[in-house]
Image: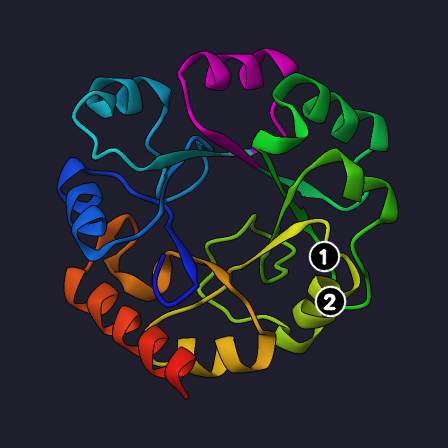
């Protein structure tokens, strides 16, 4: 935790990047299991490097998994499961993910258009909600920033849940993002990369400096 801000680095594809993220003091390491993602790692590759990873919390990133796929992720000993899904996904499907993983291990990342709020029925199904930027053609990882004041309103209205801010966060905008959103949990990905899946330690360190400055302001 950096000055009261928890940090997850998502889209990791190598042990080298996971190790420098650990050295920088991040809290969570995210691995993408969605085959259509440019940062796709896959379960087998994750398991091959798993024993060598730093002792940080691990997060599996999935898109609308089947129950069987979710069970495979849980069996691989991920600490948390992050699920991206369309806003019109049946509530019963979301409830099934919650029942399988348990609310305390589940990060829900609904794909919300600008005019839509988080559905009340989702709130008791997961402790964590990831607020990402809407893109009709993608499930996260777009590199575009979102509506930070809207995130702040959701966070204030539903303090029983933990709200994670994502979407194009990097060293050049994280200060403004923290001040406008009030976030104390962030997810960084494309904003600290040189190419999809290739993280840049210098960018991550610059981001952490900006977190210090924003929280000290």
Q: Is residue 105 left or right of residue 212?
A: right
The secondary structure type at the circle numbered 2 is: helix
Q: Quadrant of residue 37?
A: top left
The residue at 47%/19% (across/down) is 73
Vertical order, 212 against 44 (above or below): below
The secondary structure type at the circle numbered 1 is: loop
Q: Quadrant of residue 86?
A: top right
Determine contact: label 2, label 1, CB under 8 Å.
Answer: yes
Vertical order, 34 against 154 (above or below): above
Place of residue 162 in the rendered image (x, y in percent of width and height, measured from the top left): 62, 51
Cα distance between the residues tagged 2 and 1: 6 Å
The residue at 64%/15% (across/down) is 67
Vertical order, 106 against 151 (above or below): above
Of the pair 143 and 36, the residue shown nearer to us:
143
Instruction: Give the magenta range.
Output: 63-82
- Quarter that holds the C terminus: bottom left
- Quarter that holds the N terminus: bottom left
Vertical order, 105 against 197 (above or below): above
Does residue 66 appear in the picture of this structure?
A: no
The residue at 21%/31% (across/down) is 53
Q: Which residue is mark 1?
A: 159
Of the pair 63 and 104, the residue shown nearer to us:
104
Q: Which mark is residue 217?
A: none
For disc 2, the neighbor class at 10 Å (few under 14, some 14 to 19, many from 20) is few
Q: How many marks?
A: 2
Place of residue 100 in the rendered image (x, y in percent of width and height, measured from the top left): 66, 17
Q: Which residue is mark 2?
A: 156
Q: Is residue 210 left or right of residue 132?
A: left
């Amino acid at each position: 935790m950096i000055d009261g801000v928890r940090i997850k680095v998502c889209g990791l594809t190598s042990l080298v990047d996971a190790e420098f993220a650990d050295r920088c003091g991040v809290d969570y390491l995210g691995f993408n299991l969605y085959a259509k993602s440019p940062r796709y790692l896959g379960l087998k590759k994750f398991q091959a490097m798993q024993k060598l990873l730093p002792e940080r919390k691990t997060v599996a990133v999935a898109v609308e998994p089947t129950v069987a796929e979710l069970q495979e992720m849980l069996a691989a000993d991920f600490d948390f499961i992050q699920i991206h899904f369309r806003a019109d996904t049946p509530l019963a499907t979301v409830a099934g993910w919650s029942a399988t993983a348990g609310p305390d291990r589940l990060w829900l990342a609904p794909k919300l258009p600008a005019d839509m709020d988080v559905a009340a029925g989702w709130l008791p199904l997961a402790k964590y909600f990831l607020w990402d930027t809407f893109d009709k053609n993608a499930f996260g990882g777009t590199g575009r920033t979102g509506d930070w004041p809207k995130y702040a309103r959701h966070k204030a209205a539903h303090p029983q849940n933990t709200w994670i801010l994502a979407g194009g966060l990097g060293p050049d905008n994280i200060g403004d993002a923290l001040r406008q959103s009030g976030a104390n949990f962030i997810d960084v990905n494309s904003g600290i990369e040189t190419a999809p899946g290739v993280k840049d330690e210098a960018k991550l360190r610059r981001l952490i400096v900006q977190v210090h400055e924003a929280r000290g302001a």
